[in-house]
Image (cartoon, rainbow, N blue to C red):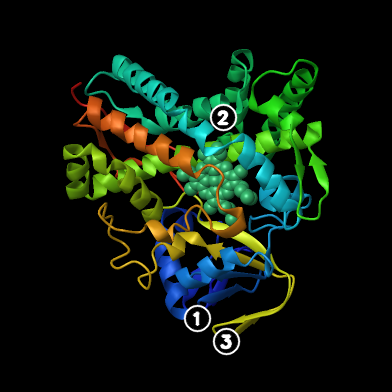
Amino acid sequence: MAEQLSATATRQGDFVFDPYSMEYALDPYPFYEWMRENAPVFHHREMDFYILSRYEDVWKAHRDAKIYSNAAGVTIERQENAGMILLGKDAPDHGWAKAMMTKVFSRERMEALDPFIRQRAVALLERAYEKHGPDGEWDMVTEFSVELPLYVISELLGIPEELRAEVHHQANKFLARGEGSTEDLQMEANVGLFGLFYGLVQERRENPKDDPVSLLIALELEDDEGVMHKLGDDEIAMRFLEMAIAGHETVAKAIPSGAMAMELFPAEKAKLGNDLSKIPQAVQEVLRFDPPSQLQGRCTTREVTLHGVTIPADKRVMLATGSATRDPRAFPNPDVFDIDRDSDSRTVFFGFGVHKCLGIHLAQREIAIAFEELFTRFPDWKVFPDRATRVAVTNVRGVAGLPIVLGKHA
Ligand code: HEM
């Protein structure tokens, strides 16, 4: 008798794929390899979406926003109202909306956060050392990698001190996965964060300060057609909500993924310990090896034919960034974590084209500083990837828990 498949699974010959399965969450890479080699335009018939898995195809699709639209959101499930966030907008609105954000959240503003990131990273590591000592095991995710980006994003957005505990609480509720977390709780947290940011915008409209909220309130921008744009209170609150979530979960996942990659490739870990100047380039390799954002959804605006498969108009297409970065056509020995690899020009793990990540510089600095401080203060640190915990989520890949021991203080 044929094996019963779940409603979200599909089969092609012996190959079975369920994007919501634990098997895929634990290790997506064998699935991608099968797709790249056997069906580079993979059709999930039951859910009626397609996956592009080869580097070249993913890269080109990222750059072709005319054919691959973001208007139905970027998750496997189509989303109503996706256009309320920057990531869900298409041209022409995306152009001026992103230009506004880039003006306020400039590279200079992000660079200026370096000392703050370092100070928070040090405080969190020292707190863990005080609590657990050199030999005590603790959870790198809850006590370090979730906390650090949350402090940083609050600082970047200019959240006043008195609101930070509440932002912390709601963002953690939003990010909680597994036991006890439900979609309702996530939605509640989303609404809570929005309300908080909305209140802040209204307050700043009355009492402007030299902070990002006030800058966005005052900003007027002319688009290519000569039309002036200004953001309303709800739009500003929405931009803040998007930044808070996009800038938090990805970094929170990238730090433990990097620690695990280093542990699994001890020669690379040793190289880093001996030469901290290699850390920034190692961050690129961490993000290539195990990208936090694995799938970016699009919708075709017209029929497209690729590798002999015709995708009709208005179909969901997932760009599998997690597969692109392991494509041997683009990266020799892709399953090897190699910090000396030169992959700068192939950074699809931050997306590419018009929707390329707004927080690239900040994300890279947060991850690099986390490891610089870890190696400097606790050169014998060790994590235990075989005891990491994962939950099945399709939007962000990474562990929910990772045991770590710091070893002696340098
Ligand atoms: C390691 C950390 C991060 C990774 C891997 C990452 C990845 C990505 C990817 C792949 C996209 C494009 C999605 C698509 O095309 O569908 C994106 C967009 C975006 N990211 Fe990041 N991101 C990271 C950190 C951050 C941070 C720290 C911020 C904010 C400070 C941020 C803000 C955004 C925003 C606002 C967008 C939407 C840009 C647009 O639509 O034009 N991200 N990110």
* Image quarter hosting the N terminus: bottom right
Which label's residue is closer to the chain start, 2 or 1?
Answer: 1
Name the disc covering residue 172, or none. 2
Label 1: how many Cα within 10 Å (few below 14, some 14–19, many 20+) = few
Q: Position of residue 33 (x, y in %)?
A: 41, 70
Foreground label between 2 and 3: 3
Q: Quadrant of residue 328?
A: bottom left
| Label 3 SS | loop
| Label 1 SS | loop
Left or right of 266? Residue 365 is right
Does residue 171 appear anywhere in the picture?
A: yes
Q: Position of residue 344 (x, y in %)?
A: 38, 56
| Label 2 SS | helix
Q: Position of residue 401 (x, y in %)?
A: 41, 36
Amino acid type shown at disc 1: Gly
Q: Establish if 224 lies above or below 199.
A: below
Residue at image x 73%, y 53%? 79
Amino acid type shown at disc 3: Gly
Residue at image x 49%, y 31%? 149
Amino acid type shown at disc 2: Asn
Label 2: how many Cα within 10 Å (few below 14, some 14–19, many 20+) = some
Pointer 3 residue: 308
Q: Establish if 324 lies above or below 276.
A: below
Name the disc covering residue 13, or none. 1
| Measured Cα–Cα span from mark 2 to mark 3 | 45 Å
Q: Position of residue 331 (x, y in %)?
A: 34, 66
Left or right of 359? Residue 216 is right
Does residue 181 appear anywhere in the picture?
A: no
Instruction: Name the residue nearer the viewer: 36 or 19.
Output: 36
* Image quarter hosting the C terminus: top left
